Image (spheres, coloured by chain):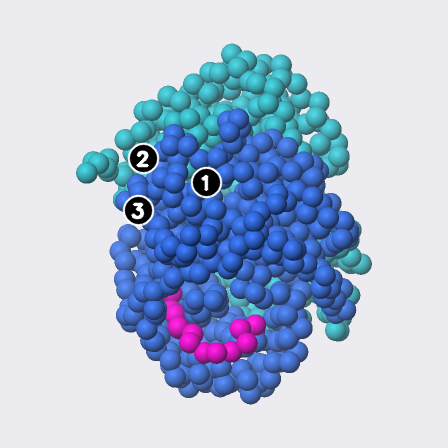
Chain colours: A blue, B cyan
Amino acid sequence: MKIIKNQKINETVYIETLENGMKIIVIPKKNTKKKYVIWSTKFGSIDNNFIDPTTNKEIKVPDGVAHYLEHKMFENENGVDSLYKMMALGLDANAYTTNDHTAYLFGCTDNFYEGLDELMDFVQHPYFTDENVEKERGIIGQEIGRYDDEPGWKLYVNAMDCLYKNNPIKLDIAGTVESIAKITKEVLYSCYNTFYHPTNMVMCISGNFEAEKIIEEVKNRLLPREKMEEIKRIYPIEPKGINKKEKEANMGINMPMFMIGYKDELEEDKVKEDLAIQIIFNSLLGKSSKVYQELYNEGLLQTSLDSSYEYSKTYAHALIAGESTNPKKVYEKIKETIANEEISKEDFERSKKKIYGDLVSEYNDVENIGRMYLSDAIKDVNSMEYIDKIDDISIEYVNEILRKLFKENESIISIVK
Amino acid sequence: MNNSVISTEGFKTNLYAIFLTVPLNKKEVTINSLIPAVLRRGTEKYPNQLEINKKLEEMYGASFNCGVDKMGDYQVLKFYMENLSNKYLPEKQNAVEFLKELVFNPLIENDGFKKEYVEQEKENIKRIIESRKDNKSQYSLDRCIEEMFEGEMYGIYKFGNVDDLEKINEKNLYEQYKKIIKEARIDCFSCGEEVEKIEIPIERSKQEQVKCELQEHNIKNKEIKEPMDVSQGKLIIGLVTPDKPKSVVSVYNTVLGGGANSKLFQNVREKASLAYTAGSSYVRRKNVIFIKTGIETANYDKAVEIIKQQLEDMKNGNITDDEFNSAKQLIIANLNLIPESQEDLISYYFDQKLYDENLKLEDYIANIEKVTKEDIIDLAKDVKLDTIYFLHGQERSEA
């Protein structure tokens, strides 16, 4: 077992990879009654083409399968729905699907082990029938409809369409009404057998636990599975550079929304790069920046810009989102700032202090901790690296990233009106 | 003065809050909602947002938040400051001083607020009000409340209205601010480890008791359909609950629509596959329950019928032990989570103080445990349907 201790924030992380290939991460927290567990498979909306490791055959599945599978996992042969069973125990249980993983989780103060029994039982026992697969189609159809009315979602999907030519990150996670029409129980079983194998799964647990003990508890609930080779996923080849410069959608909203994006093709330590990008965004465009104040005073921005950096094994990009009556004008101003400014020593030091505070605050809540370690683990990152590495970031490195990722790179903009 | 300390362990941060509370009032709602927006623009010591934000970042990422809220028939101006607790700070920071500076020591020019800030914030509030329709879920709920509480205090929108903005200037806004500081009820909270009490730096000559009695509500029997360009219709139904113990209404609401085991979720979503979301929420301080669901426009009649059937079933005592027990479990589980969030702790105790109940969390939980199924059925007989509101698009013709 790997044990990582951090004196500064007084936290310890235990990481164990089991014989069957499953990874378990435990972050113990004293002084809290809340317990949280999240169990995930590296199977998301972008994994629609792969080689089945048992037959060596290439398989293509309809868009939206990972999400459809998530909905159907709660089904049991005895007719009891596991989600409702967990909620009846007073657990805050849920599941979600992203572009690169599917996760099942619950938080609680009481009945943790009853919940763990149920969680580990239903995730290891799929039960799909023609009828129960059919029943879900209407519900997921409504969920897709809800996304269609969501301007923020449209904004994001269009930004991805501008950045990427082929990468399936630009597809809707839940698929389309047309694509989900093709999903059958056979498709679900095939994906389940491939992706819901321990070698492809990670579990994170946080709360008042002893690491060895809780790992033993998890092991006792795991069913034996035959060894499996790593799954080969087939992704379309993504050409260098952006797909298109801009995309606009009209949804009849009063305050237009925009998202500016930079595609990241650099080969960097992603944690260090992430920290450098946070420093850049905070210094140049954050609430304490000159540009933000000017945009605010001119009435072009009402709330602060929401900047982020997203990366996985198949994509990486930096995004700047906001709302403005005149998104194009804000875009010009941001481009101009990025082209002409360098990060000053003063801004650099202050931004580092702020980011340190943000990183420490993440450890307030076991749910937040669990989610953070899980989503980082999917990318083969251990979240503690952030606090360890922030002291090592130099101003020279930050300005180098500013030049390579932003100054010498083409940007895109997605607008929803 | 109500200043409380809530001690917590295990958090990396401390949270401080100052709440100014006044009765909702149609004439003053807009001008009041402008006060936090202008205060956060500048203080005597930190005259602009640039200086304020730099200071917050220098404090290792402290954060300041403010806004307006509607709590029952009250309008509450809220101010929060969160910062790392001393253990994790390389150098000590004075968060309380800074919060007090922001609320009680604004930037003043010529006996008024800074004109530029007031004009900009008027414009911002105007845009917020005009953009209400952008968030369809929130908008449909707000509209249902407006219709159901037409002519009553609770029907007032928390940001007020655009017409009032014209009359507001830097001088009369400052006068209103001084009045609020003097006359509003003030509650302060300090939550965390080794936190200091917040002492208000002003003299309060008139210690008025800000109190409003629950306003009488007459059943409206409205059915409103509002067309808009949406692909999914939003159905909101307002119910009036009788003046019975809130613990009983709380369990009733949770059996009806509080989670995946509730009647609404099971029947509207699982059995009829009409919706992705279907549930209800209870506004304790107004004795109302709002049912919310998103459906195809064409399924309106079907959905309303199923919902009415659930209300009928509860009246007739068709509540299984599972439904009843899981509802209680869910409420208690949620109450047990309150101490896990500093913001929730402050909200809980503020609500208890404002309504003079001062119930400890464990007593609150004990009350829920005492509720019986008979209590629920008894209550169900007096629950009345008040207003049905439907925000809908064109009926889709299936190709």
SS state under label 2: loop
Q: Amino acid at mark 1?
A: His
Please name the amino acid that badge 2 sits on: Glu
- Residue A193 rendering spot, x and y as whole percentages: 48, 46
Examine the structure image and report whether residue A260 is included in the region drawn in magenta: yes
- Find numbered disc 3 in the image and state the secondary structure of the residue it sits on: helix
Are labels 2 and 3 on one chain? no
Q: Visible in this render: residue B122?
A: no
Report which residue position mark 3 lands on: A179
User: How far apart are labels 1 and 2 at the CA level?
Assistant: 20 Å
Disc 1 and disc 3 on one polypeptide chain: yes
**Inter-mark Cα distance, 1 to 3:** 16 Å
**Whole-Å distance between the Cαs marked 2 and 3?**
20 Å
- Camera-side residue of A226 and A14: A226
Expressed as whole percent of the image width and height from the top left, the position of residue B341 reads 67, 49
Residue B81 covered by magenta stretch: no
For mark 1, what is the residue?
A: A71
| First to last magenta residue range | A259-271
